[in-house]
Image: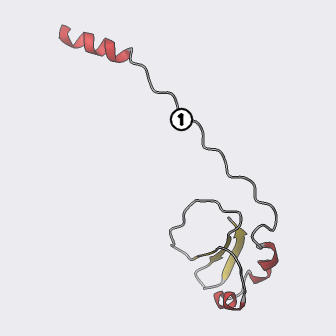
Amino acid sequence: MRYLILPLLLAACAAYPPAPEPVPSPPAAEPGACGAAERQRLVGAPVTALERELILGPVRIIRPGDVVTMDFRPDRINFEIDAMERIARVYCG
């Protein structure tokens, strides 16, 4: 029993590594950086309405159940599609 006391005391004195630095929050996107404001008229329209849109730059279409990364890109326009195949939301990121 007394052989266990010394390792326990030494373990209690061990130095802990420093806490990691917090991750900085993404920069705020400038309004209109991706063109989402001009496409708010598409909310409620069927997803086929996107076929008539000319969008220059990165685009992401998000359907129900899709796995989406949490990376933030202010120049990318996101179209969120609902279960009825209608555009539910348009936003930058």
The outermost residue toward the front is 56
* On-image quarter of the C terminus: bottom right
- The amino acid at mark 1 is Pro
**In the image shown, does 5 or 31 lie closer to the viewer?**
31
* On-image quarter of the N terminus: top left
Vertical order, 93 against 83 (above or below): above
Vertical order, 22 against 88 (above or below): above
**In the image shown, does 56 or 59 lie closer to the viewer?**
56
Q: Is residue 35 left or right of residue 76?
A: right
Vertical order, 59 against 8 (above or below): below
Q: Secondary structure at mark 1?
A: loop
Residue 51's spot in the image, x, y percent?
66, 90
Picture colour scheme: secondary structure
Residue 67's spot in the image, x, y percent?
50, 68
Residue assigned mark 1 = 20
Q: Is residue 16 left or right of residue 90?
A: left
Q: Residue at x 75, y 83 (%)?
A: 42
Q: Residues within 10 Å of mark 1 (few under 14, many from 20)?
A: few
Residue 9's spot in the image, x, y percent?
32, 12
Q: Residue at x 67, y 48 (%)?
A: 25
Residue 80's spot in the image, x, y percent?
64, 75
Q: Residue at x 51, y 73 (%)?
A: 65
**In the image shown, does 46 or 70 lie closer to the viewer?**
70
